[in-house]
Image: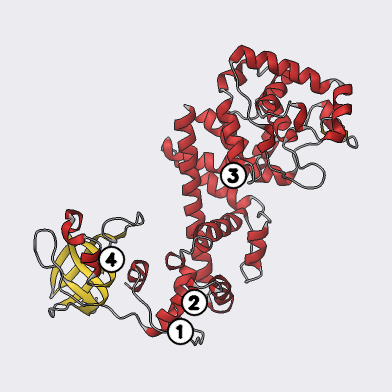
Amino acid sequence: MAENGRTTDGKDVEVIDAGLYNRQGRDPDFFNAKLKLNGVLWVGNVVVAENASDWYQHGMDKDNAYDNVILVVVGTADTDIFNSKEQPVNVMPMEVPQNVAKRYLILASDQGQAVCHQNVKEHCTRLTTRSWLSAIQTERMEWQCNEVRRRAKEFGNWDAAYFVTIVRTFGLGVNGDMMEKWAKSLPMSVTDHHSDDLFQLEALFLGQAGLLELETIPEQFQHDALNEGYFAKLRNEYLYLAHKYSLLPLDGKQWKPMGKGCNRTPHLAFVFLANMCYQRKTSLQDMLKCESMKEVQNLLKVSVTPYWQTHYHFGAVSGTSTKQLSTERLNMIVINAVIPMLFAYGREMSKEAYCDQAFDFIEQCKAEKNAITKHWEQYGIKNETAGDSQALIQLQREYCDKRKCLRCRFGYEYLRGRTKIEGYRNMVIEPDLFAELY
């Protein structure tokens, strides 16, 4: 590797490995970096600062956590540096190239996303785009895998983790956390004990969600709901079961509107879930036996109970409909519950066949259509499979929205610069930028 710089006392610096970036914001910026100083290999930590004097301003000279620092990269070398043992620390001034500096400041501005995304459309090759989407698709799968593992540990077993993961999908994003909170408030042992009685399951699920309180029904429907009698029967059954198992319901007013049209309440979600439990459709072992996407979707198919075929809310009559889970909703459950579970369970049990099946399924699933995928389609990125849509969701939420441009390959491509920019001066060194430059 060519020479990368020179310390203030004349040592030539070669960066062999920038090390592991410290994302916690404490202690050195990079751990276990490998550098050559005048041809001698050094292994240790690296600090990046605007001025060398920041070392003293932030008390690093008195903190033994910085005693293993082998290099401090600075914009201005305004002083020598010593650690808590009074040993000298190597200081390397580094001037950020003007074109990189200007583009970095643009990325950090309010217009940064739009400029970067346009650059993707105009200058990123298909190879760059597809390789990055593939990487962040795997990253999202890893994140989902960790979430499933967390639930398995928190709820005590993998069957419960699978059920809770399915439950979250019925929150349609806006109520995902509330759905998991609901699942946590209702012991699986109680659900299992009443799994052979659909009416009791529906009463338990709706009641524990706080949806069997009269004030959760819109005022214009309350009179009809009481006259119909079904609401009262469910409520009475829930009150009996809640007393028997010492259950405390959630606040039914905390649920946010979701879905489309008049059916924006969470009621049908719990009716579907009750029927899924009654028909044993949330069985992890049954899902693991499925060998194709069609088998998984057939396993998950379910409809509502008779009352809800003519209602979308207590007291609110609708046209008669079987109200089955739509193909779109089944697709969503597969993408956000079945596939992560296959991947996580395969990892945990060292069964690579399940992990491979997870990636096969995600390529077979139809791409999700939402505001994020539509946004990226405007910039030339095709959304052809669920793998693409999951990658785009991860990209937007974890990189663009959090301004982690320097960790993004699209951001890196923009920093490399192929478009003319004006109006920006030089900049101070940022730790992320050090990692990208090397």
Which mark is nearer the camera, 2 or 4? Answer: 2
Q: CA distance from mark 1 to mark 3?
A: 43 Å
* Label 3 packing within 10 angstroms: few (<14), some (14-19), many (20+): some
Which color scheme does this rendered protein use?
Answer: secondary structure
Give SS at disc 4. loop
Give SS at disc 3. helix
Give SS at disc 2. helix
Give SS at disc 1. loop
- In the rendered image, the quadrant that contains the C terminus is bottom left
Labels 2 and 3 touching (C-beta < 8 A): no
Question: Which sits earlier in the primary sequence, circle 3 or circle 4?
Answer: 4
**Residue underneath mark 1:** 424
**Residue underneath mark 3:** 336
**Viewer-proximal residue, 422 or 254?**
254
Residue at 73% of width from left, 16% of height from top? 237
**Residue underneath mark 4:** 18
Which mark is nearer the camera, 2 or 3? Answer: 2
Q: Position of residue 335 (x, y in %)?
A: 61, 46
Labels 1 and 2 touching (C-beta < 8 A): yes
